[in-house]
Image (cartoon, helix red, strand yellow):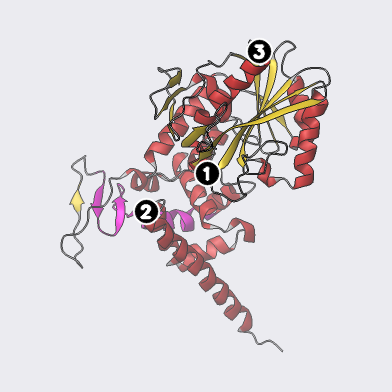
Amino acid sequence: MPGPSDGTAGARGRGRALAEVYRRFGESEKAKGSPLYGQIAIALSSSEEALRVIETAPARRRNPTLVLAALHDVALAGQAPALASAFTAPPAAPDPTPGTESTTSTGVSGAAVTGPRGRGRGAGGRSVGEAAVEVMVGMAELVLERLVGRKVRGDEGGRHAVLYPAVAEVARRVGAGAVGLIDVGRSAGLNLVVDRVGISYGNGQLFGDAGSGVQASASVVRGGLLPSTAMPEVMARVAVGDELVDVTDADEARWLRACVPPDQVERLARLEAELALAAADPPVMVPGAVLDVLPEAIARVPDGVLPVVMTTWVLSSLDLEERLRFLQRLDEAATRRTVAWVSVEGVGVAPGVPTYGDRRASGHSILGVSVFEHSSLHATGVGRCWLRGEMLAWLAGTSSPADR
């Protein structure tokens, strides 16, 4: 029969396991990703009180990325000033004498001091790790509340550099003078502002709005030129998915920011600019399972305007049967009007899109354009891309084996 101490021993074992998860995560983040989050995760792993709070959350809500986003959200909401101050304090300078505990004032009204133990120290003199532990323990209910129903959305930025030439190309092929963009599976629908950003390519080509607050770039490999066709006027913007985010809602937009570590300043600035651009002309939102609501989303595009469905690394979440049903939905919608599909998916993920004979899991993605018209499908691959669109090889119209 279990003794009275067995429950305590089990709890200690779970606590040690959780501490190890956070410690390993912290070491990994310090080496790559977010050094700031690395410091916080290690501080949490060393605090029994903080770990006990985390253990009260449902098992699937205890992972470090979600807990750190919740802490960030509380700070962004102005509810944890000391933690917010530590987030924005200057990085710690390396200690010239190993083992010493020196600190250096920033000279800004004593607002922050830096030292070897943390990224910065807030107005109260606490390191970012100490401030995070204090919030985790002292504001436990508030932090845990942030975890309910939340999902880390760390990859929300638009994929403008690969989408712009593909949308322009498919519109040219159809002869469309206007398009309605339908963004599938991207919760904030930030792909939908693709026509309102500035885009520069490594080969010197420029597209879009050079004066936009959002500027995207991509290097071009193989030395080819992208088509010079401009994207036609966008007459409709529609976001589709079962976890949509309303960019005009302050709390939802703040959560998107919270999912980006505070020390990834450039990434945060770009997200901020994209959210502002999207909020200025918010999309029509069609919530629900994609396969169920896609016909409704296409119907939201006015007659006489080409619906262009866009998928960027979302179809891999569907099994093969569901992907084929996705294709069927597009085909069904094309019985009364032409429908276009621009896909940026892993090799072999987008059904019907040629892959240049590339192997699956090859490390790059295929950029495809497809036209559905009167129950016929014309699908072509127009390029390859790497690093989520930061590198692009435009292959449409090329015949050189070296390019393929």
Q: CA distance from mark 3 to mark 1?
A: 34 Å
Check residue 274 for magenta coloring.
Answer: no
| Figure quadrant of residue 200 | top left
Which residue is labeled 2 in the image? 35
Which residue is at a point 57% across and 59% down the rendered structure image? Answer: 62
Q: Is residue 397 above or below residue 88?
A: above
Residue placed most toward the observer, 70 or 312: 312
Side of 196 relative to 82 (left or right): right
Which residue is at a point 19% across and 65% down the rendered structure image? Answer: 100
Residue 176's disc is 3
| Figure quadrant of residue 253 | top right
For discs 3 and 1, the disc positioned in front in the rendered view: 3
Point out the stretch of residues depicted in magenta.
111-140
Residue placed most toward the observer, 319 or 277: 319
Residue placed most toward the observer, 248 or 7: 248
Q: Is residue 157 above or below residue 296?
A: below
Circle 2: residue type: Pro
Residue 124's disc is none
Side of 54 relative to 76 (left or right): right
Circle 1: residue type: Gly
